Amino acid sequence: MADPSSYRPRPGEIPDSPGVYRFRDEHRRVIYVGKAKSLRQRLANYFQDLAGLHPRTRSMVTTAASVEWTVVSTEVEALQLEYSWIKEYDPRFNVKYRDDKSYPYLAVTMNEEFPRVQVMRGHKRKGVRYFGPYAHAWAIRDTVDLMLRVFPVRTCSAGVFKNAVRTGRPCLLGYIGKCSAPCVERISPEDHRELAEEFCDFMAGRTGTYLRRLERRMAEAAEEMEYERAARLRDDIGALKKAMEKNAVVLADATDADLIAVAEDELEAAVQIFHVRGGRVRGQRGWVTDKVEEITTGALVEHALQQLYGEETGDAVPREVLVPALPDPVEPVQEWLTGRRGANVSLRVPQRGDKKALMETVQRNAQQALVLHKTKRASDLTTRSRALEEISDALGLDSAPLRIECYDISHLQGDDVVASMVVFEDGLARKSEYRRFQIKGFAGQDDVRSMHEVITRRFRRYLAEKERTGEWTDGEEPGAEPGAQADPGAASAGLAEPPASTLTEDDGRPKRFAYPPQLVVVDGGAPQVAAAQRALDELGIDDIAVCGLAKRLEEVWLPGDDDPVVLPRTSEGLYLLQRIRDEAHRFAITYQRAKRAKRFRSSPLDDVPGLGETRKQALIKHFGSLKRLRSATIEQICDVPGIGRKTAETIVAALAQAVPGGPAVNTATGEIMDDTEEPGQQTGSPGEPVSTGAPDERRGQER
């Protein structure tokens, strides 16, 4: 625990101007980012008597080992820089809103020749129009199903679309009138794009004009006694009105606004957002955060605005944002929002009328979200703290293990042996720190020896990072010993970790394996624990605790002890260790399956230099199978478009060196495949073996 006075800046060093500051810990990792109108006044608040600080702030300043700052011209620049640094460094003591799910959006891919309507999650893509978010994907599909009657826009995937183009036959939606079938040229690209634009306009809230147009066309058809067309238009109007009824009118003046409400207690805060477009609620989302410092409601709102609009521009930022409390000061935030939108944005607290009533509804949703969050054990800060304290007491540690690393070994009958490393900080998974290893020191099945190798490689890298200032060699696998080369096949398939970027020592982000844990957990019993401890002893590391969690009876094993530590079944500490162990097992077995699937899909053609995927597919399409290609002559191979004689000779030589495998077997059903195909030519992924029983008891099976 550091004394803040040891790194307190000298009087007069801190400028009295706007800026952004960063606190770093002893490993130079950024643990907190903040902004201030006056850096001198703001930083002075951190270096007062510790007894007068908020408990979370006191924990931050005693964890930190240094502070630095950057001066900017305006408060708007400080806001932008603070957001960028929080996103880049992910500081552990900053307010970070945790979203418990990936909200689905209704998306229209206007960046394609034939725009497609679909459900999308995750990061937003350039050139795609988004509507939502929705609480459930089925709500989107129900809405789209109603709207396709009037706006028959393409909804099929790229594969289905290409197949329809090739066969000249549309899919079922094309036959029943819910797709205009651009795949078979029933509609031109220009008309289909116009149809997609009308779909987007309707979803954006511009519904009145389009409904009036349909009603006028229906009346004209009736006057001309075209009753069938009039009936279709009547049904189209009904479908659109039904789709509109799914989003009730909440603001009569057709307002475009976002309403943000905050519910909080001393430890946590929940944020709820309603997206209102055209007076109707078009989407809803919510976040929860730990209050890691003493913070006002206005400051929570400011962080929520950064999270909500930090990546948005244009119409994605509404004209009006209604909040329960204004940030202090409000002018820089309002100016920042205006810059994101490119037009004036009103940021205010509703005082009366429909908007205040709707804000009360959003507030009730926030209160319910906070109550629901409190019931979830894994995310409850108090429960996590108790779990870490229980682990500390049971293992005899000096302090609670704020960073825990867990390792697991996975293989299938001794083949494709891999290992995983997962990281939990403050009781929560930190997936950006996960690593995976290929066992290279030996072949075969030996979990104890594999564990020793993985721990040795990981902490050898840790020691190397403490001593040297250089970076990794490009292409070197994380966890490999210095100078060892990563598996090129794994790298090409995206299985190996990417090479580290050229980071400096002082940028705040730890290099690979440079940040040590307080506790190492291994998946296994006494033998695996002994192997891990022996690896640390050989490296001279004596300040990291080791334990193992055996699956059979959920016993905790310590190095050198003949008897395990048995935690109560109701213990939060045991529950946390189980979650960490299960996450390590999941991460390891996912990697092992990916490597095995890649090996099954491999082909002798992969070893032919200069032969890309397109020409490999052309060869297989021309000859029908790898077996027939193997029996072809050089002249026959030269008949394939794009294959010259030199390439054909190389292909023949590569196939001659490759040993043909036995008949392909579907591992899910046991069926022997057609002998005209070979295992390397299967187009689907092989079936996965079913795991039954505890992995420690399944020798010879996948673990």
Image (tube, rainbow, N blue to C red):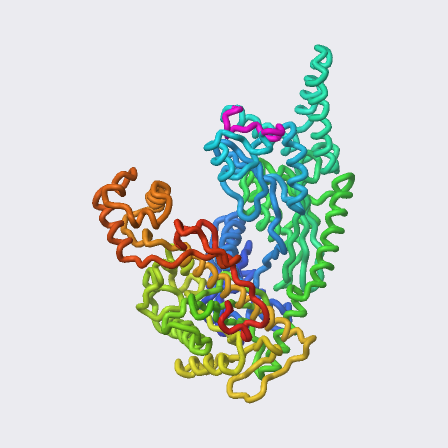
Q: Residue, x 53% and y 52% (percent of image)?
A: 83
- At 62% from the left and 28% from the top, the residue drawn is 177
Front-most of 491 and 616?
Answer: 616
Q: Position of residue 382 (x, y in %)?
A: 67, 69
- Viewed as shown, does residue 259 lie left or right of 451? right
- Tell me, yes or no, whether the highlighted magenta stretch contains residue 176: yes
Q: Residue furthest top?
A: 224
Q: Which is nearer the eye, 659 or 438?
A: 659
| In the depicted structure, whether residue 221 falls above or below residue 511 | above
Report x, y in % for residue 639. 27, 38
Q: Is residue 351 magenta?
A: no
Identify the residue shown where x is 41% and y is 75%: 453
The residue most toward the left is: 646
**Percent of width and height locating residue 12:** 48, 64
Task: Indicate left or right for 342 with 352 as reference.
Answer: left
Residue in view at x 38 percent, y 55 percent: 602
Specify the segment rendered in magenta: 175-187
**Considering depth in this image, is 671 or 182 the residue closer to the camera?**
671
Q: Main secondary structure of the magenta part?
A: loop
Q: Is any part of residue 48 visible from this angle?
A: no
Q: Quadrant of residue 229?
A: top right
The answer to whether residue 529 shows anywhere in this view is: yes
**Looking at the image, how many numbered discs can be counted on the residues?**
0
In the rendered view, does 347 fall on the left or right side of 74?
right
How far from the left and from the top, in percent, is residue 669? 53, 57
